[in-house]
Image (cartoon, rainbow, N blue to C red):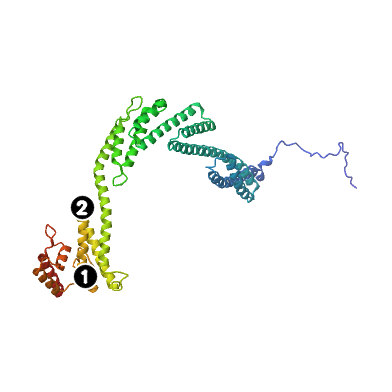
Amino acid sequence: MPRIPTFTAKEEMTTDVGGQISNIQISPTQTVAGALLPAAKQTQAYFLKKRDNEEKLEAKKTLLELKTESDKLVLSQKNNPNEQESINNWKTKFDGISQNRISSIKNPRIKKLVQDGLDLENLESIYNLKTNSFKAFEDESVKTYNNEVTMLSAKYKTTNNPVLKAKYKDELYRLAEGFNNTHELGDFDKKERRRKIDATLLLSDADFTIGLGFDNAAEQIAKIDSSQNGATFLNDEDFGNGIYNSYAQKINDLTVKGDPNADYELAEDLLDQLETFKRYNGSEVLSGDRKTKFSSLKQRVLTEKISHDKLVKDIAMGEEFEEYSKGQKSILESKFYNALDSSFNKTKNKALAEEAGFEYDERVSLYLQSNPDASLFERQQYAKQLSFDLMDKYAEVSIEQITAFNLQENKFNVTREADSIIKARQMYLKNPEEKNILKTLARLNGYVDEKGNPQVNKFYNDYIKILNQRKEG
């Protein structure tokens, strides 16, 4: 048999790969999957950034809503001078609003952003509350101070008791010092407030003295001014303005044209005082613009005095005539109607009385408009004659004969038969001195001569034509 060749191994068995060693290496990033790694990381970073921005935007929107609510509450406390109270009021209401809103947020990251942002916003709100409260305190303090000064000054002005005047003045000083200390305004402010008080009270004394209307008002004011050495705290210009304004106000109050309580004579006396008024140091009140204003004031008063006197007289005369005229109208109406007399209280009687009274008012009104300068006596005479004439006009006339009276369109409002007018004229021609309806109608319709006597014939000629036209119509 053929023999199989054998050999003996000279080396031990090993796991090493036989053959030559290669220097060639392959990078894992050069594969398709490896190449996608950077892009994947970039995509992941983008989405994270997008999420963060969206959440920040959502948080900002929520914060803006809450800030709007907070600002409303801050504004509601704007005029609250109590700082702690305003903060507590804001906190009580806003805490509930903010907590309800935050609890509705599901995203924990957004919730954290809102809570952190709200802490900063709340600091700003509290700062604004404190600022507003301080300003409100200042405003309220100033308002209260001014009101108290006004009240005490008014009390000072309206009393002539020297003890009370001294008391009110001391109270004003204490009030000014307390205000100064509260707001820490310093010594200059304290001195200025006292100076203003002294100036105000000096002018108040002057105004009170002028208001009394005494002849020696100017001398009395000069004594008060000099005793206080007023020029040291009230300069001449301000003193002059104060004195002029007080005199002008008093004069204007006294010179209301047509007012029965007006006193133009006293106003003239005050004008004389003001015209020569000098301060104790020789400074004249009427200088500069005040001198020009005084000239206009004096001219107005002197001019108005004449028309005022006439107006007052006219008003008094008008009131007296009105009473007289009412009496004449009452007499006229009672001629036709009396509620207590069964023979004069029928409907037709009342209608006649009302028509006569209406015509009376119309004619009196026209007379007064046409004769504004008529004396009281002339007015009374007209009213009396008118009452008599209307009694004649409406006597023995039935209500069916009457139409609505009108001075422009229907002066002949009583329908009369031509025959009765012709008969009345015949009676007149027979005896012109006797009472006759034609005389009455002539007077009522303006047919009178220069002396006021009725022009019967002229009236008759015109009136008979009217009656005939009515008959033909």
Badge 1 vs badge 2, beta-carbon distance below 8 Å: no
User: Which part of the image, by quadrant, shows the C terminus?
Assistant: bottom left
Q: Residue furthest right?
A: 1
Count residues near mark 1 (Cα–Cα under 10 Å), then give few for <14, some for 14-19, many for 20+.
few
Residue 48 horizontal/vertical position (percent): 62, 44
Q: CA distance from mark 1 to mark 2?
A: 30 Å
Regarding mark 1 in the picture, which secondary structure is present there?
A: loop
Answer with left or right where residue 132 lies relative to residue 234.
right
**Rendered residue at 25%/52% (across/down):** 317
Amino acid beneath label 1: Ala
- From this view, report whether residue 316 is shown above or below residue 359: above
**Rendered residue at 21%/70% (across/down):** 395
Report how many numbered discs are placed on residues in the image.
Answer: 2
In the rendered structure, which disc, 1 or 2, sits on the residue that comes first in sequence?
2
Answer with left or right where residue 45 lies relative to residue 411.
right
Q: Which residue is mark 1?
A: 395
Residue 213 horizontal/vertical position (percent): 34, 37
- From this view, report whether residue 219 is shown above or below residue 327: above
Numbered circle sitting on residue 375 = 2
- Give the quadrant of residue 456: bottom left
**Could one spot residue 328 in this view of the protein?**
yes
**Rendered residue at 53%/44% (across/down):** 75
- Give the quadrant of residue 214: top left
**Could one spot residue 473 in this view of the protein?**
no
Q: Residue furthest left?
A: 430
- From this view, report whether residue 457 is shown above or below residue 190: below
Residue 142 horizontal/vertical position (percent): 49, 37
Along the viewing direction, whichever of 16 and 279 lies nearer the viewer: 279
Amino acid beneath label 2: Ser
